[in-house]
Amino acid sequence: MKNFVLLVIASLNFLPLFELVLSADLNRFLDVEQKYYDRNVTTSINPKCPTNECGNFTLVHVQQQGRDDVIHHIWTMENVPTFFYARTELNTEMSIDWDKMLSGNYSQAISFNKEPQYFAAVLIFKFFMYNDLNDTGMIPEKDNYGIVSYSTKKMTWELKSSNFSGNISASVAFRLNSYDGVELDSSSNIEITLTAYGTRGRSSILPHLAFTENSTQVDFVFDRVETKESFTNARLAMELATVVSEPENQFTLNVSQSLDDEYTPGVFKLMEVHSALNQHWIQWRPVCYTSTQRDIGDSTGLYQTTIRNVSDENLNNTLLEWLSLNLDTRFLLMKGFNVSFGVEGDGFYQASNYTAWTMVTGHGRPIGDQFSLMVILVMAIGLGLPSIVLILGGAAIALRNHRNSKDDLLLSD
Amino acid sequence: MASDDEILPILENEVPGDVTEEGDVTETVNESSEPNHPNEIGDDQDVEIQLTGCGASPFCDPRRMPHRFIALFLMCLLGFGSTFCYDNPGALQDNLKSDMGINTAQFANLYAWYSWPNVILCFIGGFLLDRVFGMQLGTIIFATLVLLGQLTFALGGILNKFWLMEMGRLIFGIGGESLAVAQNTYAVSWFKGKELNMVFGLQLSFARLGSTVNFNVMGPLYKHVSQFYTGYLCTGVVLMIASASCVMSLLSGLILGYLDKRANRILKKTGQAGEVIRFSDVKDFPATFWLMSVICVAYYVAIFPFIGLGQVFFERKFDFSPSNANAVNSIVYVISAVASPFFGILVDKVGRNILWVFLAIVFTIGSHALLTFTFVNPYVGMVTMGFSYSMLASALWPMVALVVPEYQLGTAYGIMQAVQNLGMAVVTMMAGRIVDDQGYLVLEVFFLAWLCLSLVATVLIWVMNASRGGLLNMSVAERDKHERELMSKENLEREKFFASGSMSDVTPYDLLQPRSDFAMRNRYLSRIGAKIPEHLVPQASMVYRALR
């Protein structure tokens, strides 16, 4: 009987194993339960546009209303894809002078009734396709074997879908429509999906990046992009740039080793670009997925270049110029870097004809990696239980030895 | 699992004190190493056959040592193919996954398929070898299965059919583990009463060598072949080349069969009586045995599935190149090849098995934790794991012989290996899924949880054992003393019993000692002077099993 009880105790130790297998979602659910931070998300597309003509112009306005302030996101793919946000006081309104906009005079047409406390933006200027003959995975500084660059100014995008679930999150997807007047082949698909949340948590799709209540997740998909015929080793890349309303426009790229790959299996690195005042950040994992189901087996890496200055002429006729801000955008120093998809030995873009990559950009500080509740629980039980059994068992034996130290029941006694 | 890590010469182990009720019976057990034993071969046996020509030279005369060592070399080669190919998937994990377009879960299945047949074969492998095929034919059959399995596995690569690869691993598994049993049977047949322990040690080290060579050769081989073939074709061709090792094993099996036949003729050897496995023994096994089985499963699943999945882990977490990742992965094998014999001697001399097992598990937890929660160079963790693993293997398997009577050891080890293979199959599959869905941190935590479970089992064994005199954790000197005391107590008891006449069958002592029906019946039978049934008498044939 006692043996049986002991075996039952032993089998209890299996519990963490089962829990481990079953409870991955439970603990993600618990992570999100941080009501204090929550913001109320409201969304509108082309707010207060008076006519139907706004249809060929898309500007998404997302507000994350918090306790003390509001984050206004303005996302647009017009001219240059720009993902802008501003932190303002409560009850600050954004207004668009549609008359001005529709007449083509975009400059300073968008304004806030109270000056933003802080603003920043991420812009995409160019996409590249290059021939990686030496299979390095890095976009060459000089055009050795052929680099084709596609300026986003020549692109038109269409709003493919939008999903505003209550006041919790807002998501819009844009699909590339045409480049330089030529329509994109219907079998190809280049998509950018933007999502803002009102809470902290992790994205439900890989790479499960952490988001905050004042961040934007940007997801890129390059599906069946037609590669240049002469490019045997084609790879894709793009140029990202960022500006902030900080006096010193300095950015740091921080590559951190992470012990924890439970959210992004097999990836132990986290890249982060942050501003000098640590107010604005861009975060991503060096992984891009090569199939729609996104798993560790269908993935490859990516490289980014160092951060460098980008001429602010590029800001001409972008959302930043259309905004009426106190700070003259001409004084904004812009910084940028290239991201190149794929690493050596992965068979190039043609191997899968699919690349999906996700980054998150936000205000304040991002959430650091921390072990999930499940991991902590399993370790605590796993190490705690043997200790308890050891202590209890030792005590039981000591007690027993003490009680019947002399009771050999032999006939010879 | 693949063969022969720890080979336990049970012959050398003392019969535990618990069975002294049948003291008069157990005494016969140790006679097996005495001369005149029917299975004994060797110089002191009178052999009349005169050899001429080459047969008379030391290298061809089965009675002489040089010839036996030629046979030993062949025995080592016999197992090389299967140990070399067992970890082929692990060494090529990266390439295999991308070439075949499989995820980690499917990849892990390749290992699970190896383990599944061995859940059953642990019991019947020895039986097939001894009773159905005979040692010579059985060896050739199993070596052929290994070769066939590896060829099918390779063919699956060439044809880009993953199911064929899985089937290949299944066939390979059917042959692989049984071949290890055959290898040991040969060793016993040729070296019993001679250099047996050393032979087991050599075979073990040679098996480890096979694994190590695999991890360090397959990568460069793949690189070389990839100049001529790409994709799944390359994987297939590389595996096909690896199957050459199985051809070599089969050839040594054939030559060995010939040598054995010849030796049998010259030495007039009679067949070896095989181990007896009776499931009815199961009910007699003490709880400590079952806890040892728990350790056996829970500990080993944290080592071998980990090694199988290790390459990509080291590449991704520690930025190792594929070949460096394989090198660090194989370090566990290298260390155990070298350290196992020393730990074996250490445990033999010192005793205190539970303590060693406990320490081994604690250090393994430490090494896994190091790999999981730090970025310390993985060589530190893997070297620690290698030593702890060798220590555990040296201390755990002999412990079984202390709690299970010798004549039931065949069944006991069969069960342990069966549950080990079952655990390995299930856990490997789970591990693959975990990597895909939740990553390597959770995988490591999963392994750590298993290790903690084995630690709980160890502590429970210690507690249960300590409450019953603590035989398992005695030093060797204490163990001897304990045995002598038990013996004298028993003798005293017996004298008292006979002095008191047939006053009663039930003494207070009887009431205090829990015993099985089996023991009761034997006691009864021996008292009435009846002959104890043949199959219950401890067999002269001993159990030799490939244990790792």
Image (tube, coloured by chain):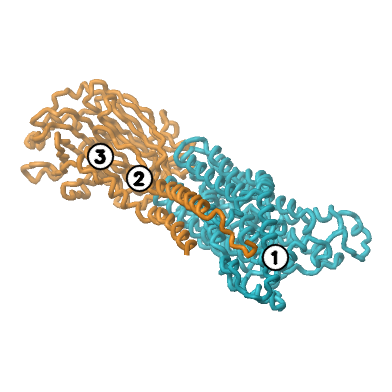
Image x and y of residue A234, in percent: 42, 41
For disc 1, the marked residue is B23
Q: How far apart are marks 1 and 2 (CA)?
A: 57 Å
> In the rendered view, would you say A104 is above or below B255?
above
Front residue of B339 and B110 = B339
Give the labeled residue for mark 2: A372
The quarter of the picture where residue A239 lies is top left
Badge 3 marks a residue whose secondary structure is loop
Which amino acid is tagged 1? Answer: Gly
Tell me which amino acid carries mark 3.
Thr
Picture layout, residue B295 above or below residue B371: below
* Picture residue at 23% right of the left edge, 27% below the top: A244
Q: Which of marks 1 and 2 is in front?
A: 1
- Where does residue B28 sit, x and y in percent of width and height? 75, 66
Of all chains in the rendering, the one displayed in cyan is B
Q: Residue at x 88, y 60 (%)?
A: B44
